Image (cartoon, rainbow, N blue to C red):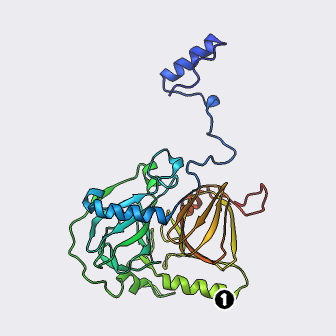
Amino acid sequence: VATTRFQGENPELDGLYGDLAEADLQPLWLQERLLTAAPPQRSVPFCWKAKDVYPLAERARRLVPIERGGDRRVLMFSNPGMGGWCMATSTMSAAIQILGPGEIAPAHRHTAAAIRFILEGSGAVTLVDGDAIPMIPGDLVLTPNWTWHEHHNPTDERVLWLDVLDLALVIWLDAMFFEPGPDAPDPGPSPSGSTSERRFGRSGIVPVSGAGGGAYSPLFVYRWSDVDAVLDDILGGIAAHHASVRYSDPVRGGDVMPTLRCEAHRLRPGGAADFGRATGSAMWTVFTGEGVASVGDSTFEVEPGDTYVVPSWCPHRLETAAGADLFTVGDAPTFEALGLMRRRPPDAGERSER
Ligand SMILES: [Fe+2]
């Protein structure tokens, strides 16, 4: 890329710029948007509405067989700030995936880690490294880095969920690997629960030996009924309008995966929460209720199934008249691991907490 090669005032300097460009060098003193006072956001605040996306997913279900979609029938959220790249933020992809009755999305694995948050339809099954996990709305399912995963819908209804992957990050890092898997026998009707839940899903008790202790949570599913009970209990004991929980690795503690952080938030009717701003990006999905989200200079009226993006360093505030439950997934663990996490609480002026 040639920089400003010809200033027109000093032929010798023009010659230097020309020779620099020929040598694939660029002078730092002419670069812009490198050492900025605050991060220039690549992605922009945006909201994908369920009332727009679900009908399009349904049309895709009727028109596009699974195999035409590269193993998955997925509508990817393409953030308008990302220049046409099918990424929701500068580190993450997000999408709505739909499976019709009897359909199977075949096994594969990849180095990008994924989460699913179930939005519609009960009784589909995701197999993670062969462990069959039945899914119902509100559940969080993990398919960590390089785990085999496939999706089966043995029900007679469509199922629909939110997918979020650390895909943009993995691609930026030149670390993407993908491998198709063997065809697996249909697991049949949903089992009562997965091995991962039976071993790691009981609060405060984990096996002394065996799986776990690795880079990601050995518990591959977190049930909404558990999240709901904890949120309820927290709000029952305080006068605040907002309660939140973080999904954590039952063995190591900490986030469920090294690159993604998942939380659930509940606002009482008439409640509000001001999150200030932080580096890193996040996707927010409304599970129940309604609200108004302010992200930077944008305002979104949100309903169940709507997903909006909070880009890095954008102020974020949420309020609700009727009350709301939201699920959120963000890239905070990556920023914390790299020493790049910076937070500014609301009303903190220019002071940042590091
Ligand atoms: Fe996948």
Q: For residue 206, what is the image quadrant?
A: bottom left
Relative image position of residue 281 (x, y in whole percent): 57, 58
Residue at x-position 25% and y-position 74%: 102
Quadrant for the C terminus in the image: bottom right
The residue at the point 54 percent across, 48 percent down is 81
On screen, residue 210 above or below 178: below
Point out residue 170 in the picture as x, y percentages from the top left corner.
44, 54
SS at mark 1? helix
In the image: residue 121, left or right of residue 188: right
Residue behind mark 1 = 236
Residue under the image location 66 percent in, 85 percent down = 235
Res. 172 visible in picture: yes
Q: Neighbour class for label 1 at 10 Å: few (<14), some, many (≥20)?
A: few
| Residue ID at (57%, 20%) | 5
Q: Position of residue 242 (x, y in %)?
A: 67, 77
In this rendered view, identify the residue nearer to me: 327 or 52.
52
Indicate the amino acid at tag 1: Gly
